[in-house]
Amino acid sequence: MNFSSRCSLGTLVVALSLPVFVGDHDLAAADDLANDYPLFVSTWPFGKPANELALKTVVGGGVLLDGIEAGIRLTESDFENASVGIGGLPNRRGVVQLDACIMSGKGHQAGAVGAIEGILHPISVARRVMEKTPHVLLVGQGAQDFALSQGFAVQQLLTSKARRAWEQWKAKQLANPPEGSHDTIAMVGLDAAGDLAGGCSTSGLAYKLPGRVGDSPLIGDGLYVDNEIGAAGATGVGENVLRYCGSFLVVEYMRQGLHPQEACIKTIERIARLDPLNVDELFINFIAIDKKGRFGAAGTGEGFQYSVTYPGYSKVLKSAALSSRSVGITGGNQPESVK
Ligand code: SD4
């Protein structure tokens, strides 16, 4: 990670002549980058305290995955966060069902849980799936049974605030979840040895159908880590990510040599080009880091905020933003040549 490698993003974006709002990334480039590992990048402003705990955990002697797990657990424990862990908005029947995954670049290991109920820290269960079973993904009752066998306790995750919101939603029989009802944490990290890891945790879309699993626990969708290249994570409407292997695609664009932020932009452009939805209706956001320690993010519409932390630095930044105006399309399966 050095000054010139980060500055090159500006050049790259200008060269592509895309009317994309590039966000705050170039501000980060101006900062002192000495002593800059481990690096943690996560979704949304609430990722900042999570990153900071992750950093503290690794600086205190933990491995990178310990940092990722500790940081995400902090968000899962936050009663005020209506989209992750306790306090998460429930499904249509009023039950909180959580999705999470974790991935280690070293050894290319992964673990995940989908639609797990009553367990406060699905990220930790995902790690146990990775470390203690021959499997990658456990769902529903089986995931909860496994968690219990590992010493996790079942508890009520539906807070009175979330219950009231669900009751109001039910009373109005709203067809769609309210604005702002999705705010997953995805976190990716890079340590001083050059190893990458990541995690993702969510209560998923508010008032989803029972049993619905989004992108967040699916490797390649809500998260992907390739220890040779980089790591990416997603937040937003999972259905619009998991039909495109979104995080995998971001990493593949980085493999082709793109800067992480440009890889996020390219991924959204590609999804928008294929999808019948207008780019402004996709509600998808990506974060990414590469093996060199460069980072970036992009989101649809106004974009989104993401958090970046390394020793001596911790900030909330604005992602690049892609609207139908900036990508020049309005949705509808347009072939590449039209662009
Ligand atoms: C999901 N992607 O379950 C998650 C929700 C989310 O920001 O990211 N919200 O579809």
Image: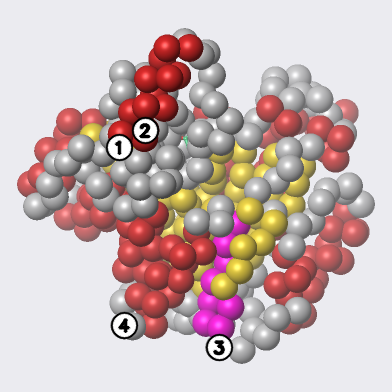
Other-residue count near label 2 (Cα within 10 Å), few / some / many at <14 / 14–19 / ≥20: many
Q: Quadrant of the N terminus?
A: bottom right
Per the model, the C-alpha gap separating discs 2 and 1 is 5 Å
Q: Amino acid at mark 2?
A: Ala
Instruction: Give residue 58's quadrant in the image.
Output: bottom left
Residue highlighted by disc 2: 162
Per the model, the C-alpha gap separating discs 3 and 2 is 42 Å
Closer to the chain start, of discs 1 and 3, is 3
Closer to the chain start, of discs 4 and 1, is 4
Residue highlighted by disc 1: 159
Q: Judge whether 153 appears above or below 24 on screen.
A: above
User: Is residue 264 toward the left or the right of residue 214 in the image?
Assistant: right
Residue 243 in view here:
no
At numbered mark 1, what does the secondary structure look like: helix, strand or loop? loop
Other-residue count near label 1 (Cα within 10 Å), few / some / many at <14 / 14–19 / ≥20: some
User: Is residue 336 toward the left or the right of residue 250 in the image?
Assistant: right
Per the model, the C-alpha gap separating discs 4 and 3 is 16 Å
Residue highlighted by disc 4: 61
What's the magenta bit mostly, secondary-structure-wise? strand
Instruction: Give residue 316's quadrant in the image.
Output: bottom right
Locate residue 29, reporting x and y percent: 73, 75
Which segment is the magenta one? Answer: 306-313
* Residue at 62% across, 44% down: 285
Closer to the chain start, of discs 2 and 4, is 4
